[in-house]
Image (cartoon, grey):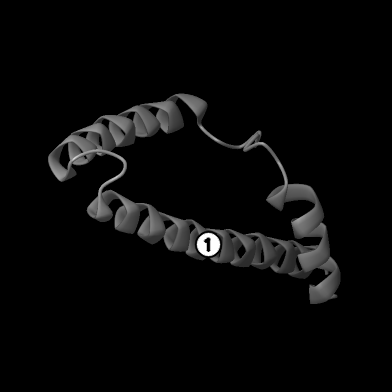
Amino acid sequence: MDIQFMKDYYDLRYEETDGENHFVDEAAYQEKQSEQSKIEDQLMEMVGGSESKVWKLYESIMCVYFDMEEIIKQAVYLQGAYDRELMLK
């Protein structure tokens, strides 16, 4: 498998999307997103609002987390592409 080709394809097709994915359980995702939003609202209130140092630190942590999540999503995609190639042999 040409791994660089598949990485480039992933970057082109999946990194720049608006989050649309036909395999996502939309109801389950929306439920978790709502839960996260409620918890974030509670946290923001506890730390003194969106301009507090603690909230800014939390936002920085989340940015790093999302970057890590993207690395994992790409790896899972590449593993699936590799498995498919093996299956077709």
Quarter occupied by residue 8:
bottom right
- 20 lies left or right of 51: right
In the foreground, 85 or 70: 70
Residue at the far left in the pictured view: 46
Q: Is 53 left or right of 84, judged from the image as shown?
A: left
Number of numbered discs visible in the structure rendering: 1
Quadrant housing the C terminus: bottom right
Q: Residues within 10 Å of mark 1 (few under 14, many from 20)?
A: few
Residue at 31% over, 58% down: 57
Label 1 sits on what residue type?
Asp
Q: Could you say where residue 33 lies in the image, as x and y percent from the top left?
A: 39, 32
Task: Look at 71% across and 41% down and name the residue there.
Answer: 17
80 or 11: nearer the eye? Answer: 11
Q: Secondary structure under badge 1?
A: helix
The image shows residue 25 at horizontal and vertical percentages of 50, 31
Position of 52 with respect to 6 (left or right) is left
* Residue 29 drawn above or below residue 75: above
Name the residue located 36 percent from the left edge and 60 percent from the top edge. 61
* Image: 21 above or below 56: above
Q: Nearer the viewer, residue 61 or 32?
A: 61
Percent across and percent down for residue 52 are 25, 48
